[in-house]
Amino acid sequence: MSIIETLVEKFPVRKSGKQKAAFRAWFQGWAQAKGYEAQETKAKGLFRSTNVVVGDPETAEVTFTAHYDTPAVMPLPNFITPRNVLVYILYQLVLVPVLLLPGALTGALTGHVLRVLTDNAGMASAIGGFAGFIMVYVALGVMMFGPANKHNVNDNTSGVAAVMELMARLPEELRGKAAFILFDNEEKGMLGSAAYAAEHKAVKKEKLIINMDCVGDGENILFFANKKTRELEAFPKLEAAMQGVTGRNFLMNKMENCIYPSDQAQFKLGIAVCACNRMPVIGYYCDKIHTKKDTVCEQVNLDFLAEGLTGFVSGL
Ligand SMILES: [Zn+2]
């Protein structure tokens, strides 16, 4: 069984504390069997995110990361167009009324009932407004902490599998050059990576981070690098290594013209990696994320990334 098949079968949902702990324990055993040492680090602060660190990001030349937590199910897919910022923002604007709808309905209904019952219009609208306000927060809470999405193959079992494929293939003599981190609580607002960056200032400011989030669905593999990262000595080597691999369409993008919110944003030298499909007009997109239809991760994507990134590390 491949790594992605094993993950999807054994740990399809990693949302509750228990599910995450079971996955981490298994991962540590797997890493050990491959000759690595993986360590859990529990962060301070909200939700006590537990990241898993392999190797030493402080001394490694590059650290490969992916979030291992999975999201709550959402009423609408998180449709993302990383290279089309206008469409990205328009879609997010469509989501806002959907999110506000339960609050608006609750407020209007409560106000109406109270007006009929009490004949006190001022009090009715005040309480109705308050009820609607509370409901907005309830809706936000359900989106973050609500029922787990059952299928998380692309977001982000694919990223975890990509990190593991790379770990499995990296020759022993190259392993000092690379480190790996599986972040917790990306879906709650990048809490795991933020905690890690806060506790490791040198990594946050000076180290190259390559973060894989939703890399399984789509034949276009997009990298996003900011200006500082593009000025690194290692950057042309990364581009050349990825361009040297066949099987997928590799695109390097300037982060300042794109939008892809994920854990790399916590690091000054963070590169984002995702897979996209493409359609006319809209361009490159990721869909199905945060819905039950998130069931696609193509092995060829994982092979492409693992081969290219292994080549990159060997050239460092
Ligand atoms: Zn994700």
Image: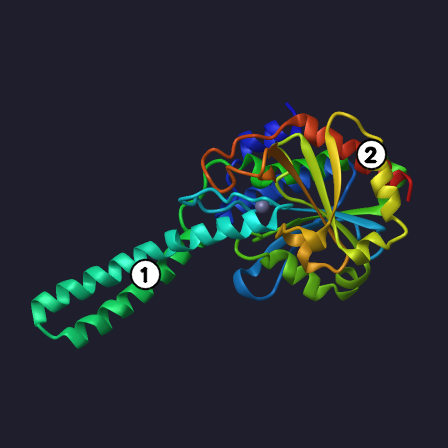
* Residue occupied by mark 2: 243
Which dot marks residue 135? 1
Mark 1 surroundings: few (<14), some (14-19) or many (≥20) residues within 10 A = many
Say if mark 2 contacts mark 1, CB within 8 Å.
no
Task: Tell whether 141 sits left or right of 68.
Answer: left
Q: Position of residue 160 (x, y in %)?
A: 65, 40
Query: What residue is rendered at 32% in x and 61% in y?
Result: 135
Circle 2 SS class:
helix
Q: Is residue 156 left or right of residue 54?
A: left
Q: Is residue 121 visible?
A: yes
CB at mark 2 closer than 8 A to ligand 1?
Answer: no
How far is the residue under mark 2 from the one under mark 1? 50 Å
Q: Position of residue 60 (x, y in %)?
A: 84, 51
Quarter of the image for the N terminus: give it: top right
Residue at the image point whose x is 65% and y is 40% from the top: 159
Position of residue 311 relative to residue 41, above or below, is above
**Residue drawn at 56 percent across, 31 percent down:** 8
Q: How is the image coloured?
A: rainbow
* Dot 1 amino acid type: Met
Residue displayed at 91% across by 40% down? 315
